[in-house]
């Protein structure tokens, strides 16, 4: 009897947002159907995929330096007589397309985020050494053309899972490439999302994070062809037995309606944590950013959210050093962080992106000023995060246990507010929510005991 053909292996490295992390899983699911097993050792990989991010300049540079390293792996394997294919996926693939093949001759395949369901076909086209580019925007729901993850794959990824419900963006903030790389906003039909979540829950998932670039603009069609908003979707998901927690990210202030705010008061499974990027606290800068909302409108949303759910934890994205930003504009951003009691934040130095409106603005802020403002913002944010975490000490909170802890006998999980918590406890609590009394604050987590 002949031996079965050796299994092929794929190594995926993801940069950037949670959408990319999740897309990497979807690519692995598609490739599993083609006989590719996932590996975390790049030297063993027959196919290396760099799943790239285009949001900031440094992200793109990182891809090309990374490609230089992958090329060395490919050459070392070639010296041993084994072939390696290199694919570039994600938003740099979408934005640069064939230019990547010209800049790095070791790349075999360039595939944009809308084309992952075509990976098997693209790989076949590159079998004979052809270099292939696919950055089309298909009109159909790409997820319907993708292999569903196998129960084993779901279990290996843990008890908290991502589900894409919406993709793309029509907002065109002046600094942002997303509307160009991810295309126009599209929502997936309700039934498809429900199917995906049921499959996850059947395999043991207890928490889903609904993903979209503008997730609260969700408007999927239901079975009768009626449009359902994010609240309606959350309501339906909340009826699924076994699903304990629902989260969503990333939202836009202009789509934050009263229905969704009320959902935070009314639906227990909806977690009291909202990531709501505001970018700046200065109306002048918000206008230049084409955000189409003011700081006062943002405060009003936060006030209503707090009225609905007083314990809600807030998180946001900030850009410092947007063209024309003065010390007073930056001061308004710091004020906003203080006034909202932001518990966590992602903050970035503005980086001009080719093709965006802001890249043409002449009043660029010097690099040293950007660095200094970023450091000040991050210090403030760090203080507020510590204060928020400190305020949970002594309280009893539900923790969804996700994995074994770092020390023997320890298990770790997340509080409703996305804080990492560890306790001494049995491994069979993994996948379940249990009350925990928070005892103390560690560097990056909270220590507690089962209550
Ligand atoms: N420069 C710096 N930060 C940016 N972001 C998006 N585009 C840029 C840019 N050109 C940030 C925003 C966004 C987050 C995902 O990345 O804060 O919310
Ligand atoms: Fe980019 Fe603005 Fe759309 Fe967010 S809302 S993806 S920052 S254009």
Image: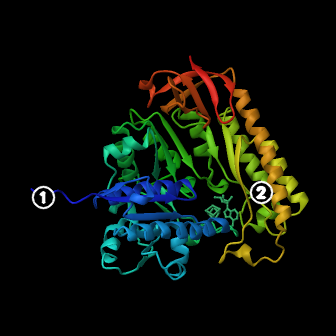
N-term mark: 1 or 2: 1
Q: Quadrant of residue 44?
A: bottom left
**Ligand 2 quarter of the rendering:** bottom right
10 Å crowding of disc 1: few (<14), some (14-19), many (20+): few
Q: Residue at x 37, y 40 (%)?
A: 155
Instruction: Decide which of 425, 80 is in the foreground and name it.
Output: 80
Q: Which residue is mark 1?
A: 2
Q: Quadrant of residue 367?
A: bottom right
Q: Residue furthest right?
A: 328
Mark 2, ligand 1, within 8 Å: the answer is no
Answer whether residue 141 is visible to the viewer in this image: no
x and y percentages locating residue 263 in the rendered image:
56, 39
x and y percentages locating residue 123 in the rendered image:
34, 71
Q: Residue furthest left?
A: 1
Mark 1 touching mark 2, by CB under 8 A?
no
x and y percentages locating residue 194 in the rendered image:
38, 47
From the image, which quarter does the N terminus lie in? bottom left
Instruction: Decide which of 78, 337 is in the foreground and name it.
Output: 78
Instruction: Decide which of 348, 277 is in the foreground and name it.
Output: 348
10 Å crowding of disc 2: few (<14), some (14-19), many (20+): many
x and y percentages locating residue 61 in the rendered image:
63, 69
């Amino acid at each position: 009897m002949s031996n079965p053909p050796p299994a092929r292996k794929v190594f995926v490295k993801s940069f950037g947002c949670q959408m990319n992390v999740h897309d990497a899983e979807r690519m692995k699911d598609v490739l599993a159907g083609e006989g590719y097993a996932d590996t975390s050792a790049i030297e063993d990989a027959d196919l290396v995929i760099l799943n790239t991010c285009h949001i900031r300049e440094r992200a793109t540079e990182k891809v090309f330096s990374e490609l230089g390293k992958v090329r060395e792996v490919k050459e070392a394997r070639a010296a041993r007589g084994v072939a390696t294919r290199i694919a570039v996926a994600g938003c740099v693939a979408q934005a640069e397309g064939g230019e990547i093949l010209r800049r790095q001759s070791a790349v075999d395949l360039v595939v944009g985020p809308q084309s992952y369901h075509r990976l098997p076909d693209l790989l076949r086209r590159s079998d004979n050494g052809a270099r292939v580019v696919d950055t089309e925007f298909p009109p159909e729901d790409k997820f319907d053309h993708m292999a569903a993850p196998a129960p084993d794959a779901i279990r290996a990824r843990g008890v908290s899972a991502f589900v894409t419900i919406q993709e793309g963006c029509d907002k065109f903030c002046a600094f942002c490439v997303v509307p160009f790389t991810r295309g126009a906003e599209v929502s997936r039909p309700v039934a498809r999302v429900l199917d995906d979540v049921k499959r996850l829950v059947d395999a043991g998932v207890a928490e889903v994070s609904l993903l979209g670039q503008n997730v609260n603009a969700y408007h999927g069609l239901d079975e009768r062809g009626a449009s359902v908003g994010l609240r309606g979707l959350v309501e339906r998901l909340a009826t699924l037995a076994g699903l304990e927690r629902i989260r969503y990210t990333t939202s836009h202030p202009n789509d934050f309606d009263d229905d969704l705010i009320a959902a935070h008061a009314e639906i227990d499974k909806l977690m009291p944590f909202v990531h709501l990027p505001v970018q700046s606290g200065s109306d002048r800068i918000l206008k230049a950013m084409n955000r189409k909302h003011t700081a006062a409108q943002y405060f009003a949303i936060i006030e209503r959210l707090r009225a609905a759910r007083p314990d809600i934890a807030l998180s946001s994205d900030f850009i410092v050093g947007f063209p024309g930003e003065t010390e007073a504009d930056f001061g308004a951003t710091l004020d906003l962080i203080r006034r909202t009691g932001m518990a966590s934040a992602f903050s970035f130095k503005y980086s001009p992106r080719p093709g965006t409106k802001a890249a043409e603005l002449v009043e660029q802020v010097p690099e040293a000023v950007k660095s200094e403002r970023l450091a000040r913002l991050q210090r403030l944010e760090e203080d507020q995060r510590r204060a928020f975490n400190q305020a949970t000490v002594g309280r009893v909170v539900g923790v969804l246990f996700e994995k074994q802890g770092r020390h023997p006998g320890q298990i770790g999980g997340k509080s409703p507010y996305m804080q990492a918590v560890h306790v001494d406890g049995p491994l069979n609590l993994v996948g379940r929510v249990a009350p925990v009394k928070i005892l103390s604050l560690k560097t990056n987590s909270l220590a507690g005991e089962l209550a």
